[in-house]
Image (cartoon, rainbow, N blue to C red):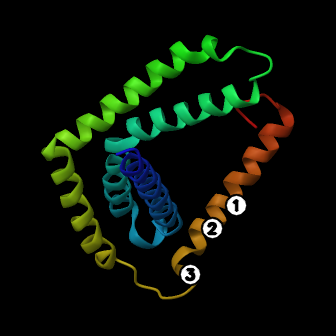
């Protein structure tokens, strides 16, 4: 059972990483596909990620707490972090149980993934060259440069 749960957490992490990659490509080709298509597709993939984000968040929190316990084992007694650890573990298990017991969530995710496979080939990409995403590359480069200038002027955590 524990191995099965670990596989689920790994799978959810991989799904979320894949969707982040898809959304990054959509940002790159925004000028090529048009803003309305970009917006529609971005929202579609964002919503898939949101449906499983809580479980991923609880899993990351739990892994972080376990890492803290290990790193601080000589300085902080394990029992002092146990209540927080137990609470996060309980929340993670509750969320996992919700997802696994609710056929609707799993069915909805399955339908969304099936739909996603058919959507990508239908994107209105006219050019099969660097020009298809050059506008996005230059826009993102310009934004990065602007963010760097702002961070140098005001190096607070938000800007960094």
Residue 1 placement (x, y as % from top left)? 34, 46
Other residues around mark 2 within 10 Å, as few (<14) / some (14–19) / many (≥20): some
Which quadrant of the view contains residue 78?
Answer: top right
Label 1 secondary element: helix
Neighbor class of circle 3 (other Cα within 10 Å; few <14, some 14-19, many 20+) is: some
Q: Nearer the viewer, residue 72 or 138?
A: 72
Q: Nearer the viewer, residue 55 or 67?
A: 67
Tell me how far mark 1 sits from mark 3, CA to CA. 15 Å
Measure the alpha-carbon separation of dots 3 and 2.
Answer: 10 Å
Q: Is residue 108 left or right of residue 18?
A: left
Against 75, residue 122 (above or below) is below
**Residue in view at x 44 percent, y 41 percent:** 56
Q: At 74% from the left edge and 15% from the top edge, which residue is drawn? A: 76
Residue drawn 40% across the image and 70% down it: 33
Residue assigned mark 3: 131
Task: Please report whichever mark, 3 or 2, sits nearer to the chain's N-terminal start.
Answer: 3
- Whether the residues at callouts 1 and 2 have beta carbons within 8 Å, the answer is yes
Instruction: Identify the residue under disc 2.
Output: 137
Q: Residue 39: horizontal and vertical position, in percent?
A: 36, 55
Judged left or right of residue 93, residue 102 is left
Say which residue label 1 marks. Answer: 141
Quadrant of the rendered structure where residue 50 is? Answer: top left
């Amino acid at each position: 059972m524990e191995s099965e749960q670990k596989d689920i957490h790994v799978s959810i992490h991989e799904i979320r990483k894949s969707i982040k990659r898809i959304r990054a490509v959509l940002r790159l080709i925004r000028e090529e596909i048009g803003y309305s298509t970009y917006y529609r597709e971005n929202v579609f993939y964002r919503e898939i990620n949101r449906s499983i984000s809580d479980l991923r968040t609880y899993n990351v929190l739990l892994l972080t707490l376990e890492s803290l316990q290990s790193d601080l084992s000589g300085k902080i007694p394990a029992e002092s972090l146990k209540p927080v650890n137990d609470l996060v573990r309980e929340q993670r298990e509750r969320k996992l149980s919700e997802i696994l017991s609710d056929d609707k969530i799993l069915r909805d995710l399955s339908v969304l993934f099936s739909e996603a496979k058919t959507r990508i080939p239908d994107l209105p990409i006219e050019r099969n060259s660097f020009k298809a995403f050059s506008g996005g590359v230059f826009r993102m480069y310009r934004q990065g440069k602007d963010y760097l200038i702002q961070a140098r002027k005001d190096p607070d955590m938000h800007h960094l």
